């Protein structure tokens, strides 16, 4: 389990960790990220906190969620970026 700092909002810490994993390529474009349940277990957070993390990742344009399928890293095509 990842230990979070007590002096910062937990959802922001988890958001930053997942965003960094996406930017570092640990989660590649089009790849499914861990489920909400997996995030809850990994970070020891409440369900509501995990949902807030997922909403923030979607709002930042880092992931999209397909009901019943999971959440996936946005591809360059989805984000409007074009490869040269």
Image (cartoon, rainbow, N blue to C red):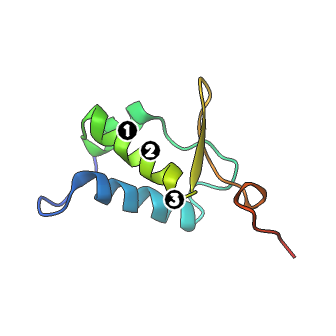
Q: Position of residue 4 (x, y in %)?
A: 21, 56
Is 66 situated above or below 2? above
Residue drawn where x is 62% and y is 28% of the image: 69
Q: Position of residue 13 (x, y in %)?
A: 30, 59
Which of 34 and 80 lies nearest the eye of the viewer? 80
Determine the residue located farthest toward the right in the rendered image. 84
Bin the neighbour count of mark 2 within 10 Å (Cα to Cα): few under 14, some 14-19, many 20 and up: many
Bin the neighbour count of mark 1 within 10 Å (Cα to Cα): few under 14, some 14-19, many 20 and up: some
Q: Which residue is mark 3?
A: 60
Task: Describe residue 57's horizontal placement relative to residue 43 as left or right.
Answer: right
Give the structural element (helix, strand or loop) at label 1: helix
Give the structural element (helix, strand or loop) at label 3: loop
Q: Is residue 54 visible?
A: yes
Q: CA distance from mark 2 to mark 3?
A: 10 Å
Residue drawn where x is 39% and y is 60% of the image: 17
Q: Is residue 3 visible?
A: no
Q: Which residue is mark 1?
A: 51
- Quarter of the image with the C terminus is bottom right
- Quarter of the image with the N terminus is top left
Q: Position of residue 53 (x, y in %)?
A: 38, 48
Which of 15 and 38 lies nearest the eye of the viewer? 15
Is 43 situated above or below 59? above
Give the structural element (helix, strand or loop) at label 2: helix
Q: Which residue is mark 2?
A: 54
Marks 2 and 1 in Cβ contact (< 8 Å)? yes
Mark seen at residue 81: none
Q: CA distance from mark 1 to mark 3?
A: 14 Å
Going from N to C along the chain, the mark reached first, 1 or 3, is 1
Is 16 situated above or below 66? below
């Amino acid at each position: 389990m990842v230990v979070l700092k007590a002096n910062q909002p937990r959802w922001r810490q988890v958001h930053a960790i997942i965003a960094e994993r996406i930017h570092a390529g640990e989660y590649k474009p089009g790849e499914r990220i861990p489920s909400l349940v997996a995030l809850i277990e990994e970070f020891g957070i409440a369900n509501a906190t995990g949902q807030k993390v997922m909403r923030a990742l979607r709002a930042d344009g880092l992931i999209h969620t397909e009901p019943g399928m999971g959440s996936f890293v946005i591809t360059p095509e989805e984000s409007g970026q074009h490869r040269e």
